[in-house]
Image (spheres, rainbow, N blue to C red):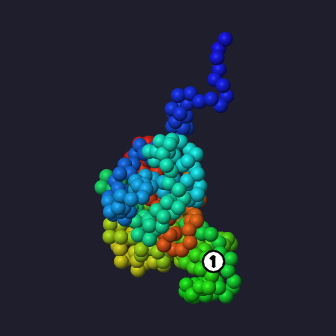
Amino acid sequence: MAKYKKLGSVTLFDAQTTKENLSELGNPLERLSQVIDFEMFRGALEDVFENRSKKNNAGAKPYDVVMMFKVMLIKHYYNLSDHQVQYQITDRQSFKDFLGLASGDKVPDEKTIWAFSEKLAKSGLSERLFQQFVDELNSKGLIFNEGQIIDASFVLAPKQHNTRDENKDIKNGKGGDLWNDTPNNKRQKDVDARWTQKGGQNFFGYKNHIKTDKVSKFIKRCFVSAASLHDSQALDYLVEESDRGQSLLADSAYVGQEDVLEKWGLIDEICEKGHRGHPLTEHQRESNRKKSSIRSRVEHVFGFEEGSMNRLTTRTIGFVRAKSTIFFKNMLYNFFRLEQIVRLGIN
């Protein structure tokens, strides 16, 4: 009679079988590891996160900076809180494998993860790492510079419950003077995020303004603002000298920026907008349809960030932290876009 494994027992081959099954199902972190050499970021990370053991051998040995960087990838890809990151790494072998941790190794706790995030934000390192990877893509000829697409998306922040007078002070730039007698309360108040309305819906938080390469769909440049900033106001921050002579595609929100287009020598392919008493002609509508068919490629970026990365949100308080989060998420999108290009053999 055949012998069956008792339910709940573990064999020596179970861990390897589980890993192989996850690979077949599509482990996104494993796929990234096959394409991205995360060691490329070690120098920049070590410049900011100095190894304290070099100065003092006392105390616990600090976690490897590249491993902590990969912890941030888990946090932002799955949109987890610091506590959830600690729990999930402890619970999931696939996360340990991605980080190079054995089953008995100590896992960074939520305070360590929070401290790493704080230093990333306050040092501006997320922005530098984003640019480092864009430079790497450029050096490999993966950004084609045959046209640029610009658009913006809301990044929702934790909603605030303030009085009407408090909101008025915040809007007038006096938020820093509020709640001084209740410092614990003040730490939870975001005086940088703003409310805005679009399509009859209210949004509170920030905006992720991006410029993507028309051909490769990599994010080349990004700019972060409060949600209330009009999309067109970010245009001059997104274009750069390497864009000169290229076409610029955008929706009609960017109409009226002729001075910026002229300044950078860009070819205007912004969708036209009709006005009361002056509707678009059939020729203009047809032109908009052709432009939109190309411009819509930027929606794939936001679709990935909203879908695969579990919504483009920030759990943090304040502009500096939100900016770091958004740059990191945009860099993470570029990681996965490269993985997709390599895996599918896209030219």
Position of 139 with respect to 194 (left or right) is left
Q: Residue furthest left?
A: 139
Instruction: State how many labels appear.
Output: 1
Q: Residue at x 56, y 72 (%)?
A: 317
Q: Residue at x 41, y 43 (%)?
A: 34
Task: Please give the residue where the numbered disc 1 appears in the rendered image.
Answer: 185
User: Residue 69 in the image: x percent, y percent?
Assistant: 44, 56
Position of 81 with respect to 133 (left or right) is right
Q: Can residue 293 be seen here?
A: no
Determine the secondary structure under disc 1. Answer: helix
Image vertical order of residue 86 relative to residue 312, above or below: above
Q: Residue furthest front?
A: 58
Q: Can residue 33 be seen here?
A: yes
State the quadrant of the N terminus.
Answer: top right
For residue 44, what is the image quadrant? bottom left
Q: Amino acid at mark 1?
A: Asn
Front in this rendered view, residue 178 or 272: 178
